Every structure is written in structure tokens, then in C-alpha cells.
Amino acid sequence: IYQNDFEQDSGSFYTSQAISAGRSLSLNKNGHASPMYIFPFTGENAKWLRVQATFRSADMEYQVWNMPQFVVRLIDRDNRIVKENMIRVNRLLQPNKSKDIALDMQLPAAHYDSVVIWFLNPESDKEITIDDIKAWTFK
């Protein structure tokens, strides 16, 4: 239902030191939060949402509160958060190795209109590279 490989994106958050193809998202000490990637979604005919991205970090962050976060939200038309899931990706990474990490969310009965995907690298001076966001539903 959604895919972003960052090849068409531009701006200060993107690096040519890509995980795949020519461009990836990069968060470091100069940019701690990515843009929000938003797409319309009502959850029709689905029970679960899975969002996956590929991550790589050369220098691991071991301070829990500084670890990079992968965040998925369901929001309504007034931008109120209906549901949110988050994972600290460094808990699953090894230095200098790329890894696909997925976040599953059981879809609520409450009404929502969109999905928001974003990435945080709070207070860390360690760089994290992100690529190939994909989202799909299943029952």
C-alpha cells in the first residue's frame, strides 16, 4: 500500500552513501528527526498493518534513550493520534550490517484516515541510514 526508496527525494536528510540504489535517508547529530511520510489509509479489509524499512549504522548507540526510533502512527483527519507503535532499531542491528526491520500494528476499530511513518535519532551523535520503506496489510 506504500513504498518509498528515497530516490526521488531531495534535501538535507538524504545521503548518496545509500544502502541500495543511489540515495538513502540519513539521520545524525545535525538532523535528529526525519520528515514525516504520510499516506491515506482506512484499514479497509485488513486486520494488521506491517511497515518495514532497511537500516544500517556503523557506530552503534548503546544509550537506550538516544537509540534511533522507527515510529508508525494511525491518525484521523484532525491529525489526532489514534494508535502508535515504536521500536528502537539499534536493539536489532549489528555494526555496518544492513537489516530489514518490520513493525506490525493490529488495526483498531476506531476511525483513522492516514498512516504516518517517521524516524527519530534523539540526542545521538551516531549516524543511522534508512532505506526502502514498504507498507502492506494482512489478515
Image: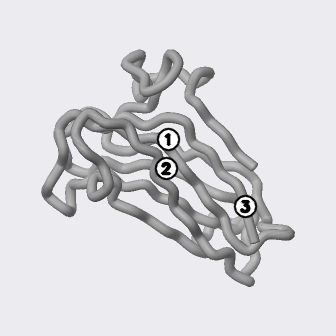
The CA distance from mark 2 to mark 3 is 18 Å
Report if the CB atoms under discs 2 and 3 are less than 8 Å apart. no
Q: Position of residue 24 (x, y in %)?
A: 46, 27
Q: Residue furthest right?
A: 45
The CA distance from mark 1 to mark 2 is 7 Å
The amino acid type found where label 1 is placed reads Pro
Q: Residues within 10 Å of mark 3 (few under 14, many from 20)?
A: some
Which residue is pictured at 74% across the width and 65% down the height?
138
- Image disc number at residue 128: none
Q: Residues within 10 Å of mark 2 (few under 14, many from 20)?
A: some
The amino acid type found where label 2 is placed reads Trp
The amino acid type found where label 3 is placed reads Thr
| Left or right for 124, reference 37 | left
In this figure, which residue is indicated by the disc labeled 3?
137
Q: What secondary structure is found at the residue carrying circle 1?
A: loop
Q: Is residue 29 above or below residue 114?
A: above
| Left or right for 122, reference 25 | left
Q: What secondary structure is found at the residue carrying circle 2?
A: strand
In this figure, which residue is indicated by the disc labeled 1?
35
Q: Position of residue 126 (x, y in %)?
A: 20, 39
Q: Residue furthest left?
A: 63
Which residue is pictured at 57% across the width and 42% down the height?
133
Which residue is pictured at 55% across the width and 50% down the height?
52
Res 57 quadrant in image: top left
- Image disc number at residue 118: 2
Q: Is residue 11 above or below residue 56?
A: above
Q: Earlier in the sequence, mark 1 or mark 2?
A: 1
Of tags 2 and 3, which is closer to the observer? 3
